[in-house]
Structure formats: C-alpha cells, structure tokens
Image (tube, helix red, strand yellow):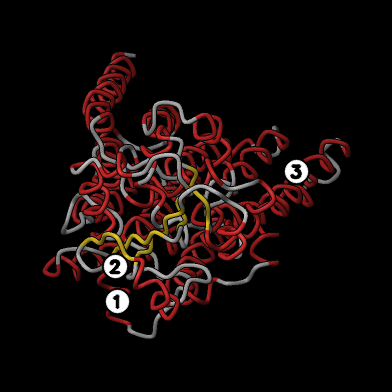
C-alpha cells in the first residue's frame, strides 16, 4: 500500500512538473512556419477544399476542426492553437502515468524526453493529439472486446489526427477486426456491426483524400544522405541510437509470444520506413514515431513481465535521451522564420491598407496575419486566375512571392512578367509586387 501511495505521489509530482516546465515555454513560443501554416489553412480554406489539401500534406482533419473556430474568428492568435496542443500533450502524459504498465523510471524518461518536453508540447501541430489518442487506445487494448464501440471510436479519432498516427492505427484496427471475428458469437451483433462501421467511416475519411489526390510521390528524393540528415541526431551518437532501436525492436519481437503484437510491431515499423523513404521524406519529429511504436508495443504486450523489460527499457531510455536534434528551435524553413521576424520588426503590416494581397500558396500567409486589421484581404493565387482577380477588384492589389518555395501553380518563369512592378524584397528570396 505504501508503494502504491509513493507511486501516486511520484506521478502527481511529475505531471505537475511537466506542466510547470512546458506552460511558460508554450506561452512564449513564436509559431514556426508549419504551425502558422496550419492556422492559416483553418482560417482561409473552404471545407470543400480540405480533401485536396489533406492529401497534399498528410494532416488529417481533426486538428483543423479544433482550431478552426478560433482561426475563423481570428481570436488571440496564436494562443488558442498553442494551448490546445499543449493540453493534449499534458493529457498524453497524464494517461501515461495513470494507465501505462511501466516502472516509474521509464515513465520519467518518456515524460522529460526531448520529444515530449520540448517538441510535442510546445510546437502546435497535429501530433500531440495523435499521441494522446494512441495512448488511450493502448490503455484500452486489453478490454477492446468488452468495450468495442469505445475502442473503435478511439481508433477512428486517432487515425484522423495525422498520417503518422494513422500508420500505427492501421495494424491495431486490423488486429481489432480479427478479434471481433474470433469472438463473433460472444458479441452482440448490433455492437459488432456498429464498431466495424465506425472503423470503415473513420478510415474512409482518412483515406479518401489520399486515394483521390495521390500526390505524395512529389515529396521523395533519391539522395539517401538526406534521409539520415533529417534524423537530426548528432553524428557521433547516430550509431548508438540506431543500435539502441534495433536492439529494442529485436528484443520485443523475439520475446513476445503474441502474434498480434509481432504483427503490430513489424507492420507499423515497416510502414513507417516505407512512408518516410518512399512517400514523404519528413523531418526529425516524424522519426519520433519509431519510438512511439516501441512504447505502444511494450504497453499492449502481456507476455513480457515488468522485470523482464529492464533491458529494453534501458535501451529505449538511451534512445530517448540521444534523440535530440542538433538545432533545438526552428522547425521549418529558416528564410520563412526570418521573414516573419523581419515583418514584425519593421512593422510591414502598416504598409498595406484597404487592399488585396495575393500569395502563391500558404507559404506566405503565416506572417501576414497582422494585416487583416487594416482591411486587407488575402487571396490565394492558386484558386483564381490572376487576370480575373485584377479585373474584378477596384482595390490596390499586391503579390507576394517566395522564390525559394513554388507551391501550387506559381512557376519561376511567372516572376519575370512582374519585374517592373517590384516594390520590395527580402534577402533576394521574398518579393512584393504592386499589380494595381
């Protein structure tokens, strides 16, 4: 009983400490390009365009729906999305301490690892809510047949948080369907069909955009060195980190006698490798999901007793400690960050009054949020012919182009016809043109 009380005190202390460390960092965090981009998508994009966008970028819909009310009303940017993301990161840590069958040492390592303490809790992306969902799924894994509808809902919601979470959800969903079929006679038929229906519906919401707009192949490269650079592990520790992961993977695979657990471990790991090497090159935060796979595998595995997990816990702990990016800070293009800072520093937003700003994609919008207070309308070049926009509007029209990023249908050759209308530039990368 005393041990249980001690464990409770340690859990409460660690969760509170996590809150106290991350909350000030989150409140003082300047949104990176990717964070602000997601906010702009929620603010400007119409619902009928979501399928196309989601297929382009692999960010499923739940995150956008959560921040959309604040984005549409432009309330206190960027704090709503920062607080929402932080809240789900804290809840993920709470579920970890309450439900995970790990010893306190391993829980402490996960809680105060770089990926949870600095990245997922601070950077307002779609990932912390996905990790929260996956932790909830893992906590209910043993009782999935007793509570199939709730388990199906958790799987479906988790799949619609991000493409990375979907990779882990898919094998868990297949295992769940197999278990439902095995226990067909024991489960109420209405509950069974409702559970499968939920999986099909949520899976369709996730997969439909990708099937209709299959464009992921545009994000790969044949330069193998790029993939290892994107791991962002200090070079001298790379071998140790990779060896640690291989050992953890091998230990969990060979020690587990449950075929379903082996299937989840192998399927999700292989799928993630294929995804990052052949579909989307990704960044270091995508690599964190290799660690999440191992954590979930240990969580749902009944075959390995806690005392026998010491070796893999040590190996995983080393991996979590070493998996720290060389540059802790920015996620996103450096030129974008500098443009945003420069935009604020020079108060460029006051240069635009009662006019229309055209951007070639969402790459510029994250740093144009302040101009709306000056009766400025932001339009996407991609969603309308340029000549039609000019002809149908009497207001002054400016075009902002980032030469280093050519999203959508803005080609480099298009820049030449605007050269005589250039009014400003930044570091020979970002140009402002007055078209009318």
Rendered image quadrant of residue 404: bottom left
Q: Residue furthest bottom?
A: 222
Q: CA distance from mark 2 to mark 1?
A: 6 Å
Label 1, secondary structure: give it. Answer: helix
Q: How many marks?
A: 3
Rendered image quadrant of residue 427: bottom left
Crowd class of label 3 (few under 14; some 14 to 19; many from 20; radius 10 Å): many
First in sequence, mark 3 or 2: give its number: 3
Crowd class of label 2 (few under 14; some 14 to 19; many from 20; radius 10 Å): some
Q: Nearer the viewer, residue 105 or 349?
A: 349
User: Which label was assigned to residue 230?
Assistant: 2
- Name the residue at 43% across, 37% down: 372
Label 2, secondary structure: give it. Answer: loop
Mark 2 and mark 1 in contact? Answer it, CB < 8 Å: yes
| Residue that badge 1 annotates | 226
- Name the residue at 29% across, 47% down: 115
User: Which label was assigned to residue 198?
Assistant: 3
Query: Is 350 rendered above or below residue 332?
Result: above
């Amino acid at each position: 009983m005393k041990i249980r009380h001690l464990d409770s005190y340690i859990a409460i202390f660690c969760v509170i400490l996590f809150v106290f460390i991350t909350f000030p960092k989150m409140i003082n965090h300047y949104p990176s390009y990717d964070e602000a981009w997601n906010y702009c998508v929620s603010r400007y994009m119409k619902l009928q365009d979501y399928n196309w966008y989601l297929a382009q970028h692999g960010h499923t819909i739940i995150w956008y729906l959560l921040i959309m009310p604040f984005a549409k009303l432009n309330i206190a940017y960027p704090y709503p999305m920062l607080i929402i993301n932080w809240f789900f990161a804290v809840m993920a840590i709470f579920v970890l301490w309450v439900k995970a069958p790990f010893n306190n040492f391993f829980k402490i390592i996960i809680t105060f690892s770089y990926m949870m303490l600095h990245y997922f809790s601070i950077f307002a992306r779609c990932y912390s809510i996905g990790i929260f969902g996956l932790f909830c799924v893992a906590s209910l894994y043993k009782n999935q047949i007793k509570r199939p509808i709730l388990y199906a809902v958790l799987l479906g919601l988790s799949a619609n948080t991000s493409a990375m979470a979907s990779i882990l959800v898919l094998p868990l969903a297949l295992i769940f369907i197999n278990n439902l079929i095995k226990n067909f006679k024991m489960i109420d038929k209405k509950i069974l069909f409702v559970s499968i229906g939920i999986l099909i519906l949520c899976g369709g919401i996730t997969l439909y955009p990708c099937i209709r707009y299959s464009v992921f192949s545009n994000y790969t490269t044949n330069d193998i060195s790029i993939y290892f650079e994107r791991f962002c592990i200090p070079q001298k520790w790379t071998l140790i980190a990779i060896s640690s992961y291989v050992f953890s993977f091998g230990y969990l695979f060979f020690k587990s006698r449950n075929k379903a657990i082996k299937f989840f471990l192998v399927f999700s790991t292989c799928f993630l490798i294929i995804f990052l090497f052949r579909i989307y090159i990704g960044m270091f935060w995508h690599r964190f999901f290799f660690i999440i796979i191992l954590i979930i595998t240990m969580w749902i595995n009944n075959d390995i007793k806690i005392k026998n997990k010491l070796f893999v816990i040590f190996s995983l702990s080393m991996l979590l400690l070493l998996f720290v990016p060389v540059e802790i800070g920015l996620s996103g293009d450096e030129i974008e960050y500098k443009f945003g800072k420069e935009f604020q520093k020079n108060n460029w937003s006051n240069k635009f009054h009662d006019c229309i700003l055209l951007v070639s994609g969402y790459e510029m919008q994250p740093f144009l949020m302040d101009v709306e207070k000056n009766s400025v309308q932001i339009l996407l070049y991609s969603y309308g012919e340029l000549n039609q926009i000019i002809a149908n509007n009497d207001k002054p029209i400016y075009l902002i182009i980032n030469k280093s990023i050519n999203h959508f249908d803005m080609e480099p050759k298009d820049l030449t016809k605007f050269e005589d209308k250039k009014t400003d530039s930044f570091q020979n990368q970002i140009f402002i043109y007055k078209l009318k």
